[in-house]
Image: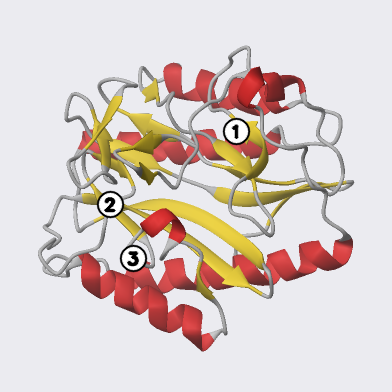
Amino acid sequence: MFKKSGRTLLRQPPQSSAQRPSQPILKSPREIQIMREAGRIVARVHASLKEAILPGVSTWELDQIALEVMQKYDASSAFIGYRGFPAHICASINDELVHGIPSKDRILKRGDIISIDIGAHYRGFIGDSAWTYGVGEISEKATELLRVTEDSLYAGIKQSKVGNRIVDISRAVQQHVEGQNLHVVREYTGHGVGRQMHEAPQVLNYVAGDADGNYVLPVGLVIAIEPMVQRGTWQTRTLKDNWTVVSKDGSLTAHFEHTVAITNNGPEILTIA
């Protein structure tokens, strides 16, 4: 995990083979069923927030809506308190990529884009999904960024088949994004997910010589695939709150994520209603 001034970020940066996490933990059909239920709760939270994302709404209000929906379904936030994170969701606006902290002072404006990252803990397992939304009418450049990033997520999911390798997912995401002259963030990565928010293997959004890239996808693996894309550069920096990650050049960012199970029938998206 990448540490900044004593705090650990929610997302993992790429790791060297010497830092490789423990072996992937495969899930049984019963465990995947529980994760499917956790994923549905995450999807319901996203649906409620999508309706609430309007000009004049604060990110704190969104955080409270998320909390209420999770509690309705006997789930809890996997984020609050994680390494000291102070909120139930991450809410990141415009050039903010991830880990934006909800606040009563952060008021949405028409034309903004906002990435909402949600992790729900339910019956011992975690569902994890992020989506980027427009606030009212947004610019053509913002629209293109959201479209390309979402499409790259599904390109990666399409490659999440038994017998393929992690690198096949990474290549599909990178080729789609860079084919549209946009930039894949390098510092943060997808990951295995289950009882822990971050499990092996790492799922990079670009092709690299990482140890997990050659891992062959087996039945029972559950991973969070999450392209993070920026308009101007792949580089990021962290703000003084030691949490909020922004694009280094101030350009717009987008983040889309689903939790996906590897099955004999192909990839199954768990974070849908």
Query: Is 163 left, or right, of 45 in this rendering?
Result: right
Q: Amino acid at mark 3?
A: Ala
> In this figure, which residue is indicated by the disc labeled 2?
100
In percent of width and height, residue 159 lies at 71, 32
- Nearer to me, 152 or 257: 257
Q: Earlier in the sequence, mark 2 or mark 1?
A: 2
Residue topped by disc 1: 155
Q: Which residue is mark 3?
A: 87
For disc 1, the neighbor class at 10 Å (few under 14, some 14 to 19, many from 20) is many
User: Which amino acid is tagged 1?
Assistant: Ala
Q: Residue at x 78, y 68 (%)?
A: 33
Tell me residue 171's x, y (percent).
61, 20
Residue shown at 36% from the left, 58% from the top: 85
Judge by depth and name the residue closer to the eye, 1 or 126.
1
- Left or right for 264, reference 53: right
- Label 3's element? loop
Q: Using the image, determine if residue 245 lies above or below residue 33.
A: above
Residue at 21 percent of width and 43 percent of height: 94
Q: Residue furthest top?
A: 209
Q: Classify residue 16 by image quadrant.
A: top right
| 46 or 26: nearer the viewer | 26
Pick whichever of labels 2 and 3 is earlier in the sequence: 3
